[in-house]
Structure formats: C-alpha cells, structure tokens
Image: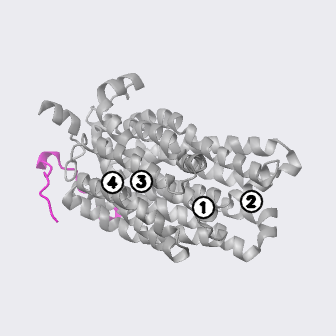
Amino acid sequence: MTMALPLADSALTQPETDEATLRRAITASAMGNATEWFDYGIYAYGVTYISAALFPGDVDDAVLFALATFAISFLVRPLGGLFWGPLGDRLGRKSVLAFTILLMSGATLCVGLIPDYASIGFWAPALLILLRMVQGFSTGGEYGGAATFMAEYAPDDRRGFYGSFLEFGTLAGFSLGAFLMLAFSLLLGDAAMHEWGWRIPFLVAAPMGLIGMYLRSRMEDTPIFREERHGGKQTDAPRLSALMRRHWRPMLVVGGLVVALNVVNYTLLSYMPTYLQRRIGLSPDQALIVPIIGMLFMMAFLPLAGGLSDRVGRRFMWKLSLVGLFLAVVPLYMLMATGLAGAIIGFVLLGLLYVPQLATISATFPALFPTSVRFAGFAIAYNISTSIFGGTAPAMGSALITLTGNELMPAFYMMAACLVGLAALRFMPETAGLSLRHDPFADRKRG
C-alpha cells in the first residue's frame, strides 16, 4: 500500500548531510538510548538478586521494595524533562546529550558498587534510591534529546528509516542487559549471583557511557539548530507556562500517544517476565528467554517499519499498530497461557504489532514542534505521560489481576491505552516528508 505524501517545499528542505556524518549521528543517538535501556534491563531482570543484597526483610517484602525503587526513576523523569529540555533548546542538543549519558552510565555503574545491607544497613537502599533518582533525572533529558538530535540530522524523506535505529538501540540495550543477567545466572549459579555476580552487568555501563560521550563529543550540533542560531532566529526557550500556552496542542497529542506507547512498552518489556513466571507458570529462565527472543524479532523489523512510514505516513503506521493491538491482545495473551511455545509465539506477535509505533517515535514526535521548543516540548510531554502511565504499567497490571482475579487484566489495560492513543491520533497532523522547519500545528491553524 502506498499513499501520496506532501513533500517539503524545496526552499524548506533540510540541507544534505554526508553519509559518514549521518551514520555517526545515528550511532551517537542510539548509544545513549542503549545505555538507558541496558540499565532497565539489568535492573528488571536482576531484581531478585538486588533486593536480597540491598534490602531488609523476607523475600517478598524485599522484592516489593526493589520494584518500588525501580519506579522512583520514573517519578523524577518529568523534572529531568523540565530541566534538560529548555537547556537543550538554548545551549544545543549536543552539550546536553554528552552530559546526560555520563550521568546515566555513572549512576548505573555505582549501583553495582553499593555495599550490601549486611554491611551498611539502611544506607544501602538509601544509596540505591538516590542513584535511581539520578538515573531518572538524566533520562528525562536523554530520550527527548536523542530523538530530536536524530530527527534533525536525518533527511526529511528518510526520517522514519533513520529514526528507527534509535529504537533499535533501545531494544539492543534492553536485550543486552537481560542476556547478561541470564548468562551470568547460568554460568555462576544462584549462590554466586546473590553474593557478587549480580554486580557485574552494572559495571558494563561505564564503558558504554564513555563510548557514547566520545561519539557525541565528536559531532557538531544538528544542522537545523545551527542554522537558526547563526541566522539569529534562536531565542531563549520559553518558560513552561508560555510553552503550554503556545504549544499545548502538540503536547497533548504526544501525551495521549505516549499513554498507548508506554503502557504497551513497559507491559511487554518490563512486566512480561514476572507475568510469565507468576501467572503462566514458566520457570525463571524460560520467562527471560521469551522476551529476549521477541525483542530480537522486533529489532529485525524496526528499520523496515521505519522505512515504510516514510512512504505511507506516520498516521497510518500508528493506526495499524493501535487497532491491531486492540483486536489481538486478548487472543495473544490466551495463547501465551498455553505454555512456552505459545508464550514465544504470542510475545513475538504482540511485539511485531507494537513495532509500527516503536519504529516511528523519533520521526513522529519531534516533527510536531518548531525548532526553538522542540527539545523542551517533546521531553516534557513525553516524560510526564511516561511517569504516570509507563512506569506504573507493571504495577497496574499486577494490581488489576489481584483485584479481579482475572489473568487477562493486563491485556484489557493495554486495550484501554490503545483507545486513548487512537483518540490522540485523530488530532495529529501528518509530517512524513515535511521539513522540520514546518510547524504543522501552526499550518493547521492557518488552514
């Protein structure tokens, strides 16, 4: 299926970036996302070991405290968006991104160095909470900045294809974290993992962060940002009140789409191992293998979906994903309940239905804002919605099952989120093929 899309006016087309520079920009952006999600992967899949080492009480209480600490990073993400977003619009994308990746990787590294509860008592969970807050604060600027950086470097007619590699980094980082936890668990055994083995994957964050900072430090800021700054158009980013007053439409659209995006995302990637183990009865290793296989399939299809969005449009891809998930999520959850083979097939199909959303995030959301507020508008809207609906999705799914006794409640919650996304999609203008110099909501108002 091919749809005719409006092409950017030649006077508004982004200047060509040579292929080598473009590849470096993609790698520099994706590396930060991989580092962020590497942290989530090792924490989510190593929570049993972390809770036993750093928290008091019996196993159930310690795991509950560790999961609550995991959610803390999401609560401070909006603060990070409020701080880093305007700074990125004022000082540049490159400077902010170089700093946020160091904060993220440094916080992850330090988690692996925290003495256990038996050694320092309540200082152990206190230090973990502090480091999770640092990680969440830095992530509040990292994702919006990386997506903006990649979108502003990519050619207008291939923004979907190149932007998909940011999410390739997401799944690569998460998969690497999950794989390392699984591999060390199999190699070292349970006793060694509880004693010291769980710390090793956290130490890998240090070289990842240094590589990412090196790549970003060698890049110039994005062409469109430099153009506005040198042309005298760049002004101080507006205060939050002015941002909300002038750009509330794209912020609401992003917020609504992110409800669907992240309820699906965190239910699939963060909650699924717990769901498969506790609700379906898979072994701990099987519950880790299922999402790893699913993520590998998703990674293979991300560039294809991103490239397709350049031809058929972002709106079509989002609608395809949201409607497909709404219709298929309950049958696929029922399939996963049949055993390991059903769980793998069900997860893979859910992941592939999610891919059209995931592949087009960094092509869709930055294009909804003008350059002067792109970083701030995206980061603030994205992180507020993520903190409310993304980080809470695993806990919400578990709570709904406990409240109702229905093992399909996470699927129903996902369906409700998809309806919110479809409602927001109605108000999203199509931006595929258009220059980032367009303000699509201003064009719509004039029209």
As measured in the structure, the alpha-carbon distance from the residue carrying label 3 to the one carrying label 4 is 36 Å
In the image, farthest residue toward the front: 405
Asked if one can make out residue 181 in the rendered structure from this viewpoint, the answer is yes
Q: Is mark 2 on a helix, strand or loop?
A: helix
Q: Are marks 3 and 1 in contact (CB under 8 Å)?
A: no
Predominant SS of the magenta segment: loop
> In the visual, does 374 lie left or right of 5?
right
Residue at the disc numbered 2: 49
Tag 3's secondary structure? Answer: loop
User: In the image, which is nearer the foreground, mark 3 or mark 1?
Assistant: 1
What's the residue at 56%, 56% (across, down)? 271
Disc with the residue nearer the chain's start (3 vs 2): 2
Q: What amino acid is at disc 3?
A: Met
83 relative to 26, above or below: above
Mark 1–mark 4 CB contact (< 8 Å): no
Q: Which mark's residue is nearer the viewer, 2 or 4?
A: 4
Vertical side of 340 occupied by 239: above or below: above
| Residue for badge 3 | 219
Quarter of the figure with the C terminus: top left
User: Magenta region: which residues?
Assistant: 1-22
The answer for how far apart the CA atoms under marks 1 and 2 are is 21 Å
Mark 1 — residue? Answer: 279
Q: Is residue 85 magenta?
A: no
Q: Which mark's residue is nearer the viewer, 3 or 2? A: 2
Name which of mark 3 and mark 1 comes first in the sequence. 3
Foreground tag (3 vs 4): 4
Horizontal side of 223 relative to 111 (left or right) equals left
Question: Please, what secondary structure does the residue beneath circle 1 have?
Answer: helix
Q: What residue type is labelled 4?
A: Leu
